[in-house]
Amino acid sequence: MQQYTGHKMYKIFLKLIPALIALTISSANAQTLPDVPEGAEALSLDGRVLTMPDPTNEKVLENLSYTRVRYMDYPMVTERVIWYGRRLGYAGDFREAIKIYSEGMYDSPNEPKLYRHRGHRYITIREFDRAVADLEKAASLIKGKQNSSEEDGAPNEFNTPVSTLHGNIYYHLGLAYYLKQDWENAKRAYDLDHGVARNDDNRVSIAHWRYMIRRRMGESHEDAKHVLDEINADMKILENHTYHKLDLFYKGEISEAEISEGIDMEDSADAATAYGLANWYYYNGDEDKAKGMMEKMLNARAWGSFGYIAAEADLDALK
């Protein structure tokens, strides 16, 4: 039998380190990501394979390349991890983004931003339970801590970020519960979100979900309309014009004809309005019309918008 000296054993061990690291990462990824067919990013709730085309936008590719290089720098810095994950998500590589956030958690297990962003991408790939777990963890980690603005990946025309870390955690947590049709917890999360709202953009997006949740819980318009009290036509909106318009529709200040004008149910760019309108038919008793509209929404090429996912979740629940 061949004998190994301590020095030889040490050299063998060093050669095994890359394989051991790869095995550890592979095992961790198996725990953080569901199995999907090769080349897929996710499975829809009705079992369709969801894929993403390779990105062609030069700015997206340039930003991704830059953040990848920064991510590889030593030592690992949480913000570099987050931005690499975000850029991967913008490029449609959602599963890889989740892996990157998960790797970042090895070094920073109590960083709420990592759980906030991984939770978002779990929503994208229809892993709602995992999203809830991450976002509840993030919510627990920010308790008693000061809120902060969150930089936009695609800045608005005013180059003014409108969201915050706390706000985004509660917003996505509420959405994850909404998609599970856990109305009580969705209501709780969006009420918390309303409590940290800083501007009119926050208020209109949150009001949209707070109103819909209450209607889905069986409240009448009269009972639910108080969440729209602060909404008015003169609000200073930088980004969330769609939610502002929907809120005014719920209040009765914009007509059904006005909100539906020009909306293409099969265009992902119109998904927020399309879902808000379809949902309005649903909780006002016209389930057939709502279902038909939601089915059309699923013909859109892009499947990552919150409106698309909400329509998919509703149709799955109606089976």
Image (cartoon, rainbow, N blue to C red):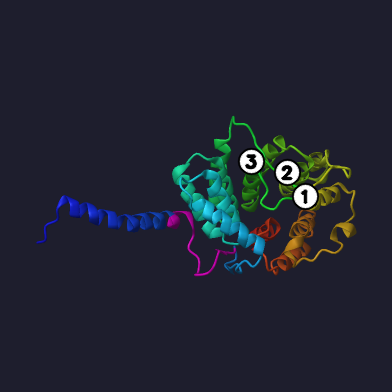
Cβ–Cβ below 8 Å for labels 2 and 3?
no
Q: Which of marks 1 and 3 is nearer the N terminus?
A: 3
SS type, badge 2: loop
Q: Which of 119 and 181 is in front in this view?
A: 119
Q: Does the magenta stretch include residue 63?
A: no
Report the amino acid beneath label 1. Answer: Glu
Q: Which residue is drawn at 55% across and 36% down?
A: 140
Q: Quadrant of the N terminus?
A: bottom left
Percent x, y for residue 2? 11, 61
Q: In this view, does 73 lie to the left or right of 309?
A: left
Q: Mark 1 points at which residue?
A: 239
Quadrant position of residue 162: top right
The stretch drawn in magenta includes residue 37: yes
C-alpha distance separating marks 1 and 2 = 8 Å
Question: Residue drawn 82% across and 63% down?
Answer: 263
* Residue matched to label 2: 162
Q: Do the residues labelled 1 and 2 touch (CB within 8 Å)?
A: yes
The amino acid marked with disc number 3 is Leu
Of helix, strand and loop, which one carries label 3?
helix
Residue range (magenta): 29-44
Instruction: Tell me: residue 74, above or below residue 95.
Output: above
Of the two numbered discs 1 and 2 on the same chain, state the one appearing first in sequence. 2
Q: Name the residue under label 3.
A: 165
Could you tell me the amino acid type at mark 2? Val
Q: Is residue 53 left or right of residue 209?
A: left
Q: In this view, does 91 lie to the left or right of 22?
A: right
